[in-house]
Each structure stands twice: as structure tokens, then as C-alpha cells.
Amino acid sequence: MTGMFITISIALVAIIVFVGLISTLIKNYIRIAPNMAAVLYGRKNKSASGDSKGYRLITGGGVFKIPFLEKVQFMDLSNRVINIRVENAPNKDGVMTTV
């Protein structure tokens, strides 16, 4: 009877550890939309050129965030429309125009 109790206890602990691991992985997977960029910071990373940087910049796709060591901020990369009105500007012929 004691051997069966130990086997059930070990199985329950294994299940709890497995569920905790899966939930940690799901929680720390960051999905990034095509019009967004994610900046992961808080840990030193080596770039392709060999330089050491304190951030990772990811555009589109997904990435795993290392728990407790990295934080994430998002940047919007959408186009912005800026309305500019210029009055009485001379063109190449010297005629005053409004653009």
C-alpha cells in the first residue's frame, strides 16, 4: 500500500511540474504583429557583429522572453500621416504657391 502511495505521489508531482513548465513557456512566448517591433531588454546579448548590447529588437514573428531577466516593450511601426501646409512658397519659376 505504501509503494502505491509513493508512486501516485511521484506521478502527481511530475504532472504538476509538467503543467507548470508548459504554462511558463506559454506565458513567456511573445507574438509580434507585422506592424510592431518588440524590444526585449534587461540582459546582455551579442549581436551578429560580436558587439554586446543590452537589448534585442525583434520585428514581426515571435520570440521567447526569459522570465525574471528580460522585460518587453512594443513599438508601433505603422505609417503616420502628417498634414503640412506651406503658404506663399516660391516654385522654381518664382511664382508664389500654396502647397
Image (cartoon, rainbow, N blue to C red):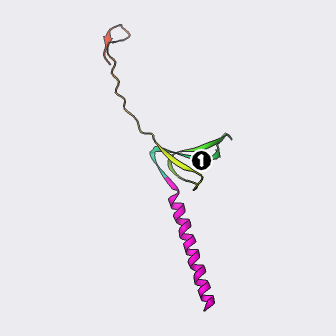
* Tag 1 secondary structure: strand
In the image, residue 69 sits, relative to residue 35, either above or below, namely below
User: Which amino acid is tagged 1?
Assistant: Gly
- For image coordinates 51% across by 61% down, the residue present is 26
**Quarter the C terminus occupies:** top left
Q: Main secondary structure of the magenta part?
A: helix
Q: Is residue 80 left or right of residue 9?
A: left
Is 3 within the magenta?
yes
Q: Position of residue 22 (x, y in %)?
A: 53, 65
Q: Residue furthest top?
A: 94
Q: Position of residue 24 (x, y in %)?
A: 54, 62
Pick the front one: 31 or 17: 17
The stretch in magenta equals: 1-30
In the image, residue 86 sits, relative to residue 24, either above or below, namely above
Q: Position of residue 43 (x, y in %)?
A: 62, 48
- For image coordinates 38% across by 10% down, the residue present is 92
- For image coordinates 64% across by 46% down, the residue present is 45
> Residue 7 is drawn in which quadrant?
bottom right
**Quarter the N terminus occupies:** bottom right
- For image coordinates 35% across by 7% down, the residue present is 94
